[in-house]
Image (cartoon, rainbow, N blue to C red):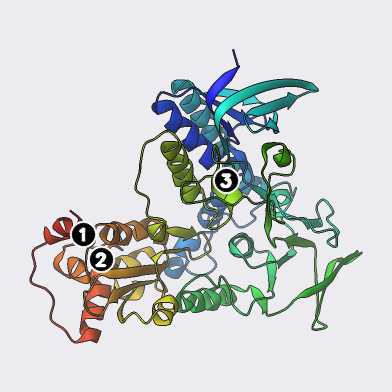
Amino acid sequence: MLGHFDLIVIGSGPAGQKGAVNAAKLGKRVALIEAQEAPGGVCIHTGTIPSKSIREAVMHLTGYRERSVYGESYAVKHDITMNDLIFRCNHIIRREVDVIRGQMRRNNVDVVQGRASFVDPHTIRVSRYGAHTDITGDCILIATGTEPARPDNVPFTPGRVIDSDELLQLESLPSSITIVGAGVIGVEYACMLQAVGVKVTLIDRRPRLLEMLDSEIVESLQYQVRRAGIRLLLGEDVDEISMNLEGVRAKLVSGKQVTSRVLLYTIGRQGATGKLCLDNAGLTADNRGRLSVNERMQTEVPHILAAGDVIGFPALASTSMEQGRLATSLAFGVERDSHPELFPYGIYTIPEISIVGRDEAALTRDNIPYEVGVARYSEISRGQIIGDQAGILKILFHAEDRSILGVHIIGEGATELIHIGQAVMTLGGTIDYFVNNVFNYPTLAECYKVAALDGINRQGAPCSEAPLPTLFQAAA
């Protein structure tokens, strides 16, 4: 039975899932509307889970992690096909869909399959196969995510000029690919495809990769991707894309021409709000389909919330989950603390990158006195064991009160390792915590102690003699 709900959630991606379950646990009647046959949204079907599953397949099949020990020619399989990569991907997608369905069932969330649109600020019409059902809600959460931008001047053609969703539909790996757009998606796929032997050219109008990252980390990434064989054309704009018998040609404003079998266009994503009839609810999206929200995740219509990629940066699965939980908690009177300034970011390039807190440029701009401690995987026994001698862990800490201001990591396990720094920052710890603590040996976590000692040595100051419990006392 449908009818009236305390909360209607539109979209079953990370923000929608977690928002729906959180509200259900608060005793609310919840409906979750999903346009596709299977729940999970872009995250499960075309975004986070597929790309990271493919990356893991690439790392395993190419023997990438073992090459520094067994030689550059080492591989588990030499003739890797698209089917090899998609096999693992499809297996994980099926498992994740089952997990989501079970979670909704256990929490008594009504999952409604169909396309949602607003009739008025409290009424949602669900359309499926020509039939329509109207349901009403006290509160509505928009969590529709995003879709690849497809400008009219780009001649998208299946199998030749494609977006990131269509990459997963390729029947075979191309011999060469041009990737236009060196954002997170573009750089991640560039690294994966190069690792399996595809000749990759990466084009972006910006002068360096991933400008939101610490400059030292980006310098290391650019060096390593070039060393892997990726051709970087930075500070370049694409003027025209055309197709001929040789493949796809990208003509640049500078006059250069790049030809490859396939061109992947990854500049920008649009909020998936075009079919929601937002005007019926008194809402307007920006020119990229995104919605603006306040600190309580409310849109300009207070009972209509929005969370996840549809509200823009940082547009990560992890942050979307937290936004969904936060939105529904606050909507139903449960106050919660959230620390978006301490959300970790993970980028699954090869090597992977993760950051939390501020970088050197931001600290310098704000005139905050800081010191830097650096540990290199080549100095750590675990780095030698796993064959990663290029990794870096960098800690930024306040030069006066010694509080941790940021942690930046590039290398194997970066996205796991970052959470140690995040926890210490959240609990108000200082650089002395890492100096005084004992880390298992040999582990990558030992990088924190090495980096802390390096920073203390640079500062020329003695380590604090305070016992470890002061970390938790400071948080209290």
Q: Which residue is mark 3?
A: 299
Cα separation, mark 1 vs mark 3, equals 47 Å
Which residue is situated farthest in the right direction here?
245
Give the residue type at disc 1: Asn
**243 and 21: which one is in front?**
21
Give the residue type at disc 2: Glu
Give residue 280's position: percent from left, percent from top: 72, 36
Q: Which tag, 1 or 3, sits closer to the chain's start?
A: 3
Q: Are marks 3 and 2 in contact (CB under 8 Å)?
A: no
**Mark 3 burial class by Cα count in 10 Å: few <14, some 14-19, many 20+:** many
Q: Which image quadrant is residue 283 in?
A: top right
Give residue 260's position: percent from left, percent from top: 79, 67
Give the residue type at disc 3: Thr
Give residue 231's position: percent from left, percent from top: 66, 76
Q: For the residues carrying marks 3 and 2, which lies nearer the camera in this image?
A: 3
Q: Which tag, 2 or 1, sits closer to the chain's start?
A: 1
Q: Residue at x 55, y 67 (%)?
A: 73
The circle on residue 440 is 1
Q: For the residues carrying marks 1 and 3, which lies nearer the camera in this image?
A: 3
The circle on residue 402 is none
Q: Secondary structure at mark 3?
A: loop
Q: Secondary structure at mark 1?
A: loop
**Mark 2 burial class by Cα count in 10 Å: few <14, some 14-19, many 20+:** many
Tell me if I can see residue 48 in this picture: no
Q: Are marks 2 and 1 in contact (CB under 8 Å)?
A: yes
Q: Which residue is mark 2?
A: 446
Q: Which tag, 3 or 2, sits closer to the chain's start?
A: 3
**Mark 1 burial class by Cα count in 10 Å: few <14, some 14-19, many 20+:** few
